[in-house]
Amino acid sequence: MAEALISVLLQNLASVTYQYGEEKVKLVLNAEKDVQEFEAKLKAIRAVLADAELRQVKEASVRNWLEGLTEVSYKMDDVLDEWNTEILKQKIEKQEENGGSTSLVTEKKMKSVCFSIPSSCFCFGQVHRIILHRDIALKIKSLNENLDEIAKQRETYNFRFTERIISEQPEREKTSSFVDESIIFGRDQQKEVLVSKLLNESSQEETGLLVIPIVGMGGMGKTTLAQLAFNDENVKACFGIRIWVCVSDPFDEMKIAKAIISGAKAVSPNSDELEDFFQCMSESIKGKKFLLVLDDVWTEDQRKWEKLKLPLIQGGAHDSRILVTTRKQEVADMMGAPTRTIYLERLSEQNCLSIFNRMAFYNRDKDGVLEAIGEEIAKKCKGLPLAAKTLGSLMRYKKARKEWQEVLNSKIWDLEEVEQQVFQPLLLSYFDLAPAVKRCLLYCVIFPKDHLIYKDYLIELWMSQDYLYLKGNMEKEIIGQRFFDNLAMRSFFQDFQKLSDGNIWRCKMHDIVHDFLQYLTQHECFTMEVKGGNNTINPLGDKIRHLTLMLASEGLLSCVSFSSYDLRTLATFDSKFKVVSSTLFSQLKHLRTLNLSGHCIEVLSEEIGELVHLRFIDLSKNPLKRLPNGVCNLYNLQTLRLYGCWDLESLPQSMGKLINLKHLYVGGCYQLKYLPKGIGRLTNLRRLDWCPVGGDDDEAFKLGDLRNLDQLQGELWIRIYGEVKVAADEKASPLGNKQQLSELSMYFHECRTSAEILNFLPPHPNLESLSIKFYNGSSAPNWIMSLNNLRFLALRDWNECEVLPPLGKLPSLETLILSSMKGVKKVGVEFLGIEKEKETSSASSCITLFPKLKKLTFDRMWAWEEWKGVEEWKEEDSHITIMPCLSSLKFENCDKLKTLPDFLWKTPLQTLVINHSGNLARGCQKGRGKEWPKISHIPNIKITGRLPFFSDDEGDVIF
Ligand SMILES: *[C@@H]1O[C@H](CO)[C@@H](O)[C@H](O)[C@H]1NC(C)=O
Ligand SMILES: *[C@@H]1O[C@H](CO)[C@@H](O)[C@H](O)[C@H]1NC(C)=O
Ligand SMILES: *[C@@H]1O[C@H](CO)[C@@H](O)[C@H](O)[C@H]1NC(C)=O
Ligand SMILES: *[C@@H]1O[C@H](CO)[C@@H](O)[C@H](O)[C@H]1NC(C)=O
C-alpha cells in the first residue's frame, strides 16, 4: 500500500509550482525548501519499498515502520490538497467577482499545486488567509521533521535496493483476449452426486426440507459447484422456484427473506419488522417446491438459523432443498446435516495444470520450456482451482523464460504466515502490478462481498481518490479503463457482464479476493455493521481511511468524537437513515468520497459545503427536494450522482462554480424542469445523462448552452418541455461538436414546434444510437440521413408523419424500431430510399439498401395497411439487394396491415413475430395465406394475440 501511495505523492510533489499567474511569491516559513527536502527523502525511501513491502508480511517491526511512513505520506497529501483547494477557491471567487460566466477560462491543468499567494490577497488584506497559509507552511515543516525520523529508522533495517521496473503505463490489452468463463475441470463426479441429492435423495427417517452443505476451504470452487447444480437442466425442471442468495458476513435474515419473496414473485410487506417478512416469505412459497442456495455462510448462531428455517419448513413443499456453501465445518454441523455434507477436496495436479495452462497459454504459441516450468508452478497451487486461475493469468503477462523462473523461485512461496494458502498466488499477482494499479485494486475492498461492481462507478471512485495519475496528458477515464482491464485480465474480477460493444459493464469479485484485500488493508479500510435506532459511528483507530457502513437502519447518522479525522471515504450499503447530522460533516473534513445513495434523506445540511476535498458524492435515490447551496462550494467535485431523486425540484443556481465537475447524473429526476444556467460553464463535463429543457426563464439552461459542453461522452437524454425558443441567429448546432457522444435520445413534451427545434439539432456524424419520441413534424429532419455511423434508430409517436423517411440509405443501421406512427397508411419504395421507376429499371449500378439491418420492429402502427417492396421483383433485378442481413422482423399491434413486401423471401430472416396483428396473421397462415410464399423460408414464425378471422382461440399459435 505504501509504495503505491508514495508514488502518487511523489508525482504530486513534483508538480508543486510556486507560481501564481506571472508572479512568483515567497511563501512564509520557507515552505518551498521543506517541500524539496521532503521530496528528496521520500525518493530515497522509495528505492527500498519493494523489499519492505515483502518483508512486512513477516516482520511486525517493518510493518510498523511502513505504517508510520504511510501516515506521514497521507498527511502530506492532505496538506497539498488543502493548499491546492485554497488556490482554486481564490481563482473561482475572483472570476465570480469579475462577472463569472463569461470570463471563466477552462482550467485544463488544475492538477498542479501552486505555492503562492495571489497578490489580490494582500490588496484586500484578507488576514484569515494569511493565517491559513502560515498554518499550512507549519504543517509542512512538521511533517518534514517526522519524515526525518522515519528516514533515520530506515537505516536499521538494511533493506535491499530493488530495481523493479514496472512501467507506470499498463500494457494495452485487447479486450477480446479475456478468458472469462468459469472453467471447471475435475468436478464432474461431485456435480453428479450433488444433483442426485437435490433431485431424489429421500430417506425414510427424514421428512421435509433437506439441507445440503458443501464444505471446503476458500478458493476450492464451492460456489462454482453450486452454480453448476443450480443451472443444471434437470434441477431447473424439478424446482418451481430457485433462489440464490449470497449471504456472507454478517448474516442478514432480512436480505434472505427479501430475496426469497422476490424470487417467488411476491410483494414485500410494507413494514420494517423481520417477523412480517418471515411471514410473507412463508406464504410466498406456500406448497411450492423450491431450491434455495445460501452461498458463503459464516454464522454458527443456531437461533438465527432456526428462526429462518422454521417459516421455510412451514411454507414450502416437503421435497424442497436448501444448498449451503461454507468454509466452516461448524456451520454444517450447526445445520445438523453431517451425513449429507459434500466435502470439496483439492483438485488433482493434472486438473490444476489444465486450468493453469488454459489461462497462461490462451491465444499464445506453445513453448516446451515454459510448459515445463508451468508444470512446476501449477504444483504450487496445491489443488486450489482459484490459485491455478490466478497464477495462469499472471503468467500470461510473462514473456521471457527468466520471468517464469522468477515466479517459480519467488520467496512468497515460503511465507508461512500468510493466512490462507490461496493468498500466496494472489500476492504474487499483486506484487506484479504497477503501484497505481495496486491502489485501485485495494480500494475495491470498500464494497461488500458479492457486490455488483459497475465499471464506470468504480473508475469515478478511483478518480475521486486521485489514483489515476500518469505522466502525460491521458484522460483519467481512459487510464481508469486500462487499469480495470488490467485487473480483469489478471482474474482479480470475475462474472463479467458485457455491453453490446464487448466492453465490460459490470462484474464481481471472488470472495477470497475480497478476503485477500481485507488482509492487505486491515489498518486502512474498515467495514462496520451498525445496528439500532440511531446510528452512531464509534471512535475508530486513527489510521482508518476508508469506512464502509452496513445495515444502518432508520434514524440519524452521527458520530461520537470522530477521532478518525482523516477519513477519506464514507460508503454505506444496505442502509436506510433519514438524517445525517451536521456535525458528522464538520468532523470529516478530509472526505473525498461520500456515498449516501438509497437512504431516506429529505434534507441535507448546508455543512456539506465544508467538505472541500470532496470529489465524489452519490446521493442517488433519496427523497431530496433540493440540494443545499453549500454544494456549490465544493470546487474539487468531479462526480455528482443524483440519479433517481424523484422529488428533486431544482438544482442550486451557482453550480457553474463547480469547474472540476466531470460527471453529473440526474436521470430520473423527473421533477426537474430545467438545469441551472451555470451548467453551461462546466466545460469539463464528460457525462451528463439527462438534460431537461423548458421555459424561457433566464436562470434556465437552454438548448444553445449545450454547445459549450463539447466533451460530453456516452449517452445523453434531452427532454424538451413546452415551447422552447430557438434563436434565429443560431447557425451551428449545439450538438454538432460532440464527437464522443454515442447515444442520443430526444423526447418532446407538449411541444408544437418540435420540427423546427429538431432541425436545429443535428448531432455529430459519429453518433451510433438515436431515439426521437413525440416529434410532431410531417417529415424527418434531413440530417438523419447523414448519420453514417448510426447503428440503432427508434422513432416513436411521430403523429404527423405519413411517409417514412428513406432509411434504407443509412449504411450502418443494424436495429430499427418504428412505433406509434398514426399517420402512416402505406410504406413503399421511399422507405428503402429509391425512386421507383428510375432506379429499378436502370441495371447499371449495384445498390444495397439497409445493408446492415438485422432487427426491424413495427409497433402500434394503427393505420398502416400495406407494405410494398420493389414491384414485380424478378431474379434479374439482382443489382438491387435489400436487407441482406435481416434476421428478425416483428409486427405488433399493426391491426390493419395486410401485405408484406416481395423482397422478404430473399432475406435471410430467422425469426418472424406477428403479435396482435390479425390481418397479417391471416395472410401468413401456413400454406394457405396469401403472404405465405414470401415467408415460407423463415425457420421461426410466431403468431400470437387475437386471430379473429380464422380462429376463436385467444392465445398462441406457433407454427
Ligand atoms: C436418482 O436419480 C438418478 C439420476 O438422476 C438415478 O440414476 C437414480 O437411480 C435415482 N435414485 C433413486 C433412488 O431414485
Ligand atoms: C434518535 O435520535 C433522535 C434525535 O436525536 C431522537 O429524538 C430519537 O429519540 C432517537 N431514537 C432512538 C431510538 O434512540
Ligand atoms: C453507493 O451505494 C449504493 C447503495 O448503498 C450502491 O448500490 C452503489 O454501488 C454505491 N455506489 C458507488 C459508486 O459505490
Ligand atoms: C403539431 O404541429 C402543428 C403545427 O405544425 C400544430 O398545429 C399541431 O397542433 C401540433 N400537434 C400537437 C399534438 O402538438
Image: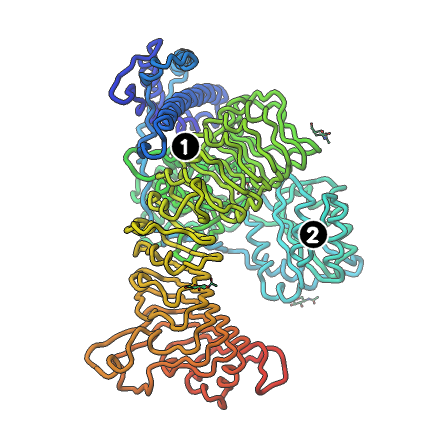
Q: Which mark is residue 785?
A: none
Q: Amino acid at mark 2?
A: Ser
- At 52% from the left and 23% from the top, the residue drawn is 543
> Quick check: which quadrant has ligand 1?
bottom right
Between 475 and 703, the one lying in front of the other is 703
Between 696 and 851, the one lying in front of the other is 696
Tell me the SS state at disc 2: loop
Q: Which residue is mark 1?
A: 657
Q: Amino acid at mark 1?
A: Lys
- CA gap between label 2 and label 1 equals 43 Å
Tell me the SS state at disc 1: helix
Q: Which residue is mark 2?
A: 268
Q: Is residue 416 above or below residue 326?
A: above
Q: Residue furthest bottom?
A: 928
The number of discs equals 2
Q: Residue furthest left?
A: 844
Give residue 97's quadrant in the image: top left
Count neighbours of disc 2 (C-alpha within 10 A) and say few if under 14, some if 14 to 19, many if 20 or more.
some
Q: Is residue 711 above or below residue 70?
A: below
Can residue 612 be seen from the camera position used here? yes
